[in-house]
Image (cartoon, rainbow, N blue to C red):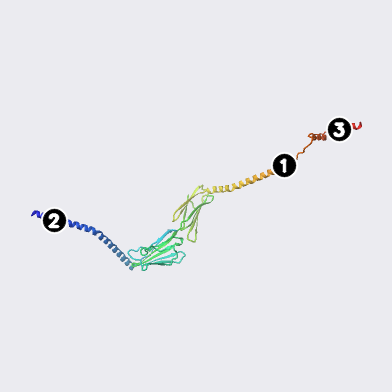
């Protein structure tokens, strides 16, 4: 009998172990399904809670309008988003565009027909993405100076209306130049920037700054500094702007060297021309003198008797010879 009880106890223990193993395996297989279902159920509960909360808020007080300022560099792509709305479908989304010196225009998306309409003629103001019912964002590609203005998004949903406005500011980098106007004076210019740039000098000095406003909204800033008598060799001009900073350096005595080189370049050809003309003139004068000497030189006379010139000279100039001849002539005549 004791052996029979022992065998039966072992059999029951084996069956209990197999049952527990089977329960663990089934629990592991059904675990992910129950977890996924629970997550989905939680999301639905959160969405329903958010919808009910938004509905309650919309029934009590209307949502306030949110306005922000956004700066975008020129010739880039800008994307403006509507206010985020969770767990609800967009029934109507409207973008109102108010540009400077232009009449307002709009772009409208209807969720019931999935259509987009509008009267904005600027092709760079494009419609939103592939799913405007989920992300009704407005794109501007590329951004130009004329896109400065106010952009407002209005969304109509089952939970109420939502608004978001943007004051879009287009940034234009200025063209920076640094030149030397006269002895000891430098001029730094930041031309056609938007907004106006800030100019500073190294070494520091109080300078005269002028601004010129253009019709397209850009501003030219010019700063003039005089270092005459301060024995400064190099000066630097630093331009600060929302699109980036830039610094230029110039030598104050560089202009004098350039002027000397310019004078040298101008006077050298003139000097060479004068030397050539003077040489030609001297050669002509020397040639004319030789021609005159050749014309006035007497031609040689060929004499038959080489002693004749001396004889004639003695005959004309020797009085003793003349007296002797006279005496001889008189004696011959008396005889």
Across and down, in percent, residue 204 comes to: 47, 50
Residue that badge 3 annotates? 325
Q: Quadrant of the N terminus?
A: bottom left
Which of the marked residues, 2 or 1, is nearer the chain's N terminus?
2
Depth check: give the residue in front, 80 or 53: 80
C-alpha gap between disc 3 and disc 2 = 202 Å
Pointer 1 residue: 294
Image quarter (top left, top right, bottom left or bottom right) of the C terminus: top right
Q: Which mark is residue 207?
A: none
The image shows residue 73 at horizontal and vertical percentages of 43, 58
The local crowd at label 2, few if under 14, some if 14 to 19, many if 20 or more residues have their Cα within 10 Å, is few
User: Residue at the location (84% across, 32% down)?
Assistant: 321
Q: In the image, is residue 82 above or below residue 1?
A: below
Q: Which residue is mark 2?
A: 11
- Which SS class for mark 2? helix
Image coordinates for residue 301, horizontal then vertical, percent: 77, 38
Residue occupying the far left of the picture: 1
Which of the 4 quarters of the picture holds residue 240? Answer: bottom left
Q: Earlier in the sequence, mark 3 or mark 2?
A: 2
The residue shown at (90%, 32%) is 332
Please state if 288 lies on the left or on the right of 48 as rendered. Answer: right
Q: Position of residue 200 (x, y in %)?
A: 47, 53
């Amino acid at each position: 009998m004791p052996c029979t009880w022992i065998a039966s106890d072992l059999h029951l223990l084996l069956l209990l172990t197999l049952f527990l193993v089977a329960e663990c395996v089934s629990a592991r297989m059904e675990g992910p399904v129950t977890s996924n279902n629970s997550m989905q159920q939680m999301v639905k509960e959160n969405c329903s809670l958010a919808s009910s909360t938004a509905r309650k808020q919309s029934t009590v007080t209307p949502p306030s309008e949110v306005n922000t300022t956004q700066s975008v560099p020129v010739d880039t792509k800008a994307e403006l988003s509507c206010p985020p709305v969770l767990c609800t479908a967009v029934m109507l989304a409207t973008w109102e565009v108010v540009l400077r010196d232009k009449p307002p225009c709009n772009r409208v998306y209807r969720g019931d027909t999935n259509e987009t309409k509008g009267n904005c003629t600027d092709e760079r103001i494009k419609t939103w993405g592939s799913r405007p019912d989920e992300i009704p964002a407005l794109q501007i590609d590329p951004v130009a100076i004329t896109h400065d203005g106010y952009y407002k998004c209005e969304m109509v949903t089952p939970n109420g209306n939502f608004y978001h406005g943007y004051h879009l500011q287009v940034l234009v980098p200025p063209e920076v130049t640094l030149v030397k106007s006269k002895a000891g004076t430098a001029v730094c210019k930041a031309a056609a920037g938007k907004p106006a740039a800030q100019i500073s000098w190294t070494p520091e000095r109080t300078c005269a700054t002028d601004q010129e406003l253009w019709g397209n909204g850009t501003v030219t800033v010019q700063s003039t500094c005089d270092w005459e008598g301060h024995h400064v060799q190099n000066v630097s001009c630093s331009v600060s702007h929302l699109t980036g900073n830039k610094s230029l350096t110039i030598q104050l005595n560089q202009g004098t060297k350039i002027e000397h080189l310019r004078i040298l370049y101008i006077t050298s050809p003139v000097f060479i021309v004068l030397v050539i003309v003077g040489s030609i003139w001297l050669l002509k004068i020397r040639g004319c003198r030789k021609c005159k000497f050749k014309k006035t030189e007497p031609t040689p006379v060929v004499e038959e008797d080489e002693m004749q010139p001396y004889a004639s000279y003695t005959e004309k100039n020797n009085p003793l010879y003349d007296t002797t001849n006279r005496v001889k002539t008189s004696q011959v005549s008396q005889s």
